[in-house]
Image (cartoon, rainbow, N blue to C red):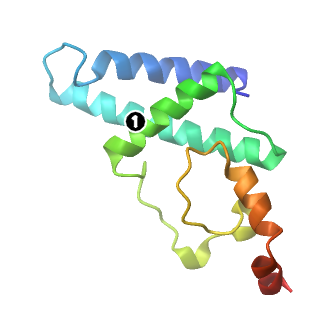
């Protein structure tokens, strides 16, 4: 579930993307293009923050605002090459205790806590922890 600030941020991002999208009917320009990609990065950041918050609580992203956020995050992933920003951290510095085991599973984010729980209960994981 999105909180009040997240809903407000999502509405602002959606508005910017609709107005500055390359297929919005406007003549594309550099400023509009920058706004579009900046809004996509903001959508991606918001998605990461919401999913992180919900995963800590063991919740899922399941409401109409959640569907819009997933849709915008998907658009961001497709148009930004899979990441909003280059990571300053290497895999060596990945915090598996906070984020769960590093997995190569494709998911929109709504099943992350289920995948994490399943991994934590796997025999292979338990062998590595003990």
Residue most extreme to the right: 130
Going by the image, does 113 lie left or right of 72?
A: right
Residue most extreme to the front: 123
Q: Residue at x 51, y 74 (%)?
A: 90
Element under disc 1: helix
Q: Residue at x 65, y 42 (%)?
A: 110
Label 1 neighbour load within 10 Å: few <14, some 14-19, many 20+: some
**In the figure, residue 32 lies in which quadrant?**
top left
Q: Is residue 96 above or below residue 117?
A: below
Towards the viewer: 53 or 30: 53
Query: On the rendered image, what quadrant is the C terminus found in?
Result: bottom right
Q: Residue at x 32, y 29 (%)?
A: 36
Where in the figure is residue 71, as x and y percent of width and height? 48, 30
Where in the figure is residue 29, as x and y percent of width and height? 15, 25
Where in the figure is residue 5, as x and y percent of width and height? 66, 23
Give the residue pinned by disc 1: 75
Q: Residue at x 46, y 24 (%)?
A: 13
Where in the figure is residue 43, as x and y percent of width and height? 49, 34
């Amino acid at each position: 579930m999105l909180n009040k600030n997240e809903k407000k941020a999502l509405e602002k991002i959606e508005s910017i993307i609709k107005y500055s999208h390359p297929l919005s009917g406007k003549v594309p320009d550099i400023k509009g293009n920058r706004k579009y990609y900046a809004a996509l990065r903001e959508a991606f950041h918001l998605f990461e923050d919401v999913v992180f918050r919900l995963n800590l609580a063991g919740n899922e992203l399941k409401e109409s605002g959640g569907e819009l956020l997933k849709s915008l995050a998907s658009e961001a992933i497709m148009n930004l090459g899979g990441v909003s920003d280059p990571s300053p951290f290497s895999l060596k510095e990945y915090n598996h205790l906070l984020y769960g085991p590093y997995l190569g599973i494709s998911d929109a984010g709504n099943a992350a806590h289920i995948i994490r729980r399943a991994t934590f209960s796997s025999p292979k994981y338990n062998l590595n922890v003990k």
